[in-house]
């Protein structure tokens, strides 16, 4: 279906563009709904729920929080396990001349 747009007015072009964009979004929604149905059917065929498929928790063990290894000498409520980014108090203590062994719990 070819439309000769050279003879359309500004209003007609705007209307055509709006209808085309609307149809484009409608087609995308239909395609997405069809894909959802296919994914759901496949998951059910294999004996899974969508929550199991997309949560990523099936067969994974949860990790316990790491036990603290270091303590802030200025504030004993601040602790760090040694994992992840260093806390500011740990870096400041090292800059002040403390050694890591001195900060161990």
Image (cartoon, helix red, strand yellow):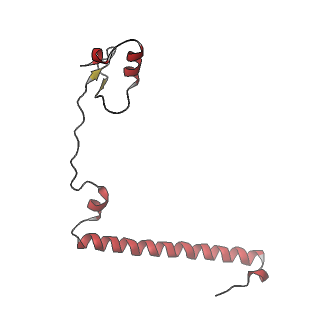
Q: Nearer the viewer, residue 93 or 73?
A: 93
Q: Is residue 45 left or right of residue 33?
A: left
Q: Residue 42, relative to residue 91: is it above or below?
A: below
Q: Residue at 31% of width from left, 32% of height from top?
A: 83
Q: Is residue 6 left or right of residue 22?
A: right
Q: Residue at 28% of width from left, 60% of height from top?
A: 51
Q: Nearer the viewer, residue 80 or 15?
A: 80
Residue 86, image x, y percentages: 37, 27
Q: Quadrant of residue 65?
A: top left
Q: Quadrant of residue 97?
A: top left
Residue 12, image x, y percentages: 73, 78
Residue 43, image x, y percentages: 27, 69
Q: Give the residue at the far bottom of this rendering.
A: 1
For the C terminus, the image quarter is top left
Q: Nearer the viewer, residue 18 or 72?
A: 72
Q: Residue at 32% of width from left, 22% of height from top?
A: 78
Q: Quadrant of residue 8?
A: bottom right
Q: Residue at 78% of width from left, 83% of height from top?
A: 7
Q: Is residue 105 left or right of residue 72?
A: left
How many numbered dots are placed on residues in this image?
0
For the N terminus, the image quarter is bottom right
Residue 55, image x, y percentages: 30, 56
């Amino acid at each position: 279906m070819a439309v000769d747009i050279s003879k359309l007015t500004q209003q007609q072009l705007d209307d055509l563009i709006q209808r085309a964009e609307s149809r484009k979004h409608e087609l995308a929604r239909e395609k997405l709904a069809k894909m959802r149905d296919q994914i759901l059917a496949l998951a059910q065929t294999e004996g899974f729920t969508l929550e199991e498929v997309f949560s990523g928790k099936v067969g994974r063990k949860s990790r316990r929080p790491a036990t603290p290894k270091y303590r802030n000498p200025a504030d004993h409520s601040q602790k760090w396990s040694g994992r992840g980014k260093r806390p500011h108090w740990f870096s400041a203590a090292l800059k002040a001349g403390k050694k890591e062994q001195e900060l161990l719990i």
